[in-house]
Image (cartoon, grey):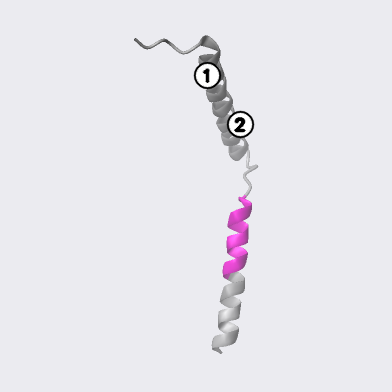
Amino acid sequence: MTTPEPPENGRARQNWVERRREKIRAEIERNRRGEYTVPTWVLALALVLIVGAWLTLIFMA
């Protein structure tokens, strides 16, 4: 026979879900207001690709 979870554990999980949903809502609202920022890893990848392309051009020419 299984026992139900203690109310505290269920409440903690519910609080975590609510916090997660609120963070997602806040991010969507920021993006709609135009406060979207490009993640750092995307900028770093773009920089590596640009430098790599330049080096390829230099060494192939």
The residue lying at 60 percent from left, 33 percent from top is: 29
SS type, badge 2: helix
Q: Is residue 52 magenta?
A: no
Q: Relative to 60, does residue 26 appear above or below in the rendering?
A: above
> Mark 1 or mark 2, which is nearer to you?
1
Q: Amino acid at mark 2?
A: Ala
Question: Percent from the top left, x then y, of residue 41?
Answer: 60, 55
Q: In the image shown, does 7 or 60 lie closer to the viewer?
A: 7
Question: Quarter holding the C terminus?
Answer: bottom right
Q: Relative to 11, does residue 50 appear above or below in the rendering?
A: below
Q: Amino acid at mark 1?
A: Gln
The residue lying at 54 percent from left, 27 percent from top is: 21
Question: Percent from the top left, x then y, of residue 12?
Answer: 56, 18
**Disc with the residue nearer the chain's start (1 vs 2):** 1
Q: Relative to 8, does residue 29 appear above or below in the rendering?
A: below
Q: Main secondary structure of the magenta part?
A: helix
Q: In the image shown, does 30 or 20 lie closer to the viewer?
A: 20
Residue farthest toward the left in the current orientation of the protein: 1
Question: Quarter holding the N terminus?
Answer: top left
Residue farthest toward the front in the current orientation of the protein: 1
Q: Badge 1 is on which residue?
A: 14
Q: Along the horizontal axis of the image, is 51 left or right of 5? A: right
SS type, badge 1: helix
Mark 1 touching mark 2, by CB under 8 A? Answer: no
* Span shown in magenta: 38-49
Q: Crowding at label 2, few (<14), some or many (≥20) Cα neighbours within 10 Å?
A: few
The residue lying at 63 percent from left, 53 percent from top is: 40
Which label sits on residue 26?
Answer: 2
Which label sits on residue 49?
Answer: none
The residue lying at 53 percent from left, 16 percent from top is: 9
How far apart, in angstroms, are the residues tagged by discs 1 and 2? 18 Å
Question: Percent from the top left, x then y, of residue 26?
Answer: 61, 31
